[in-house]
Image (cartoon, coloured by chain):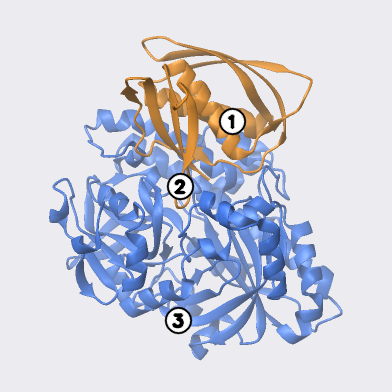
Chain colours: A blue, B orange
Amino acid sequence: MVTLQDLKRISDYEWEIPKSYREDMRVSVRLFATKRLLEEVVKDKSLEQAVNAATLPGLVGHVIVMPDMHQGYGFPIGAVAATRLPDGVISPGGIGYDINCGVRLMGSQISFDKARPHLDALATALNQNCPSGVGEKGAVRLSETELIAVCRQGSRWALKQGFASETDLRRTEESGCVDGADPDKVSVRARQRGRPQLGSLGAGNHFIEIDLIEQIFDTSAASVMGLEQGNLAVQIHCGSRGFGHQICTDYVEEFQGAVRRFGIHLVDRELVCAPLDSPEGQSYLAAMRCAANFAFANRQVLANSARKAFEQVLAGKVKDWHLHQVYDICHNMGKIEMHIIDGERMKVCVHRKGATRAFGPGSPELPDEYKPIGQPVLVPGSMGTASWVLVGTEASMLQSFGSTCHGAGRLMSRHEAKRNVRGEKLRQDLEADGIHIRAGSMAGLAEEAPQAYKDVDQVVMAVVGAGIARKVARLRPLAVIKG
Amino acid sequence: MEPVFGFREHAHTADWELEVWAPDLPSLLEQAARGMYVLSGVQLQAGSRQTCSITLHGEDAESLLVRFLSELLWLEQEEGLGFDDFSIAVDSQFNLQAELRGSAIVNLDKEIKAVTYHNLAVQTTPQGLRVTIVFDV
């Protein structure tokens, strides 16, 4: 186990596990955390998993771990690792089963005071309009031909079907469509799982949340995003559903053989990988991009359903019930990007598993209106605590492959959370705090209790302190819909 | 004293970790399946029974275990079927033939996204075999 004594302090918010910690490490591990968070981090196996990730072939720079890190499988959650092209590897376990799990934020001109009498009805309407829960099918049933179109076009497909606007796409990472998706690289099983699931939230930690914009820290950035203190905002957190899970499962299996063929020694079989320029690596990239595009379309369809719910409840009662897109980000993805590493500009594959892209001001990948301020970063907290809107910085480009944290990060196991928290009691407590709850299962609600998560304010303090993000706004939950 | 076969859940920060033990590989696979169903809160319909035959191959015990459980997840999530009666045979080349008897799932508390290979190693012990499986949930 990695201990606090193994960590070298770089600054108050940045620490290193040097390459010398274990002889099979190819690069060092850099972690962003406050001292308080570090004491929590060393209690689980996340740092050991980060050290394991640092053994993969073709890594450049450091393996980065974010302050919301926690134990996962293969890579820890909250990890960023970049491998050089063409012969570095891509690892499906370094991206995760829920490919392009991500968050969308929509802002509004609806004031909390005007909306307050309708919050319960809004929670009900969102729950009815946005399918959620274990095994629940989506709002849209796709034919095989339509699924292939979704794989190739992502949110552009949603735009053609009337589920999206041009602004929605412009304000989505990759404009809602990653190039290079090839549905032929996706198994029959994955396609079968994906067809009925578009426009569904799923269960677990996925949610739709109505928030109050409680505090603004950067007025000009908030203004560009259309976020005003005292108004409502909506977050949607979900991914590629069974479609992505099956694609990852298929390729983790396929790569078990690939590592033997390429003579890659692994400390953990979940780290299976293949060189980016190999047929296996290229096939996975093409299939992963199908799942990424599916997830973009999924959040877009859900956003459309959320807008309908707002219209149903608020039309005629408030002046403007429209929800405008702020941004849509991915936090489980592998992407080919240009970065400056040790002074050299190079093309790398950035694995982000539970980490958000956080490109700084001027990045050509950003829509024009966000170029001056940097990319919006969406950091949801737990359902009883704050969420944050941040922006990427120049430092994030140099220190963390243009990445930052993705949430509060789990602290307590699901088992322990269920043992310590009664779902019904939690629901009552949250309702007493003015948070309207709709949940498919009380046991599932207990697993996601706020006390099962780290303090999101500490997480944000760490990334802001380290300079890899900047605060824009803090949100407070008013209604939470969970599967 | 610990029974000759069984399973127990261990704390894992984000996912589920299940320790499984049994005298031999077929019964280890069966215990792993039963443990996975318990974690997910699977409840089967009383009455009407269905039988399903599975043929699988693994390169080793670990890959066979992942493939077997992944197959059960597929049947659970796509066909809505769960099983409580297992006849499993595995030869020395890790070829599996199984006859599974069960019925439609009437309740599922929690969906498992995937069976992972994370630190997966089937260990030989004086009592038989032991493994710890991490499920992504």
Residue B74 numbered mark, or none? 1
Co-location on one chain, circles 2 and 3: no
Q: CA distance from mark 2 to mark 1?
A: 25 Å
2 or 1: tag closer to the N-terminus = 2
Which residue does the numbered mark 2 point to in the structure image?
Answer: B11
Return the mark for residue A471. 3
Which of the 4 image quarters holds residue A41? bottom left
Going 52% across and 55% down the picture, which residue do you hit? A101
- Chain of the residue under label 3: A
Q: Position of residue A476 (x, y in %)?
A: 60, 77
Distance from disc 2 to disc 3, alpha carbons, whole Å, reads: 34 Å
Q: Residue at x 48, y 61 (%)?
A: A174
User: CB atoms at circles 2 and 1 under 8 Å apart?
Assistant: no
Q: Chain of mark 2?
A: B
In the image, what residue type sits under mark 3?
A: Lys
Whole-percent x and y of residue A296? Answer: 57, 56
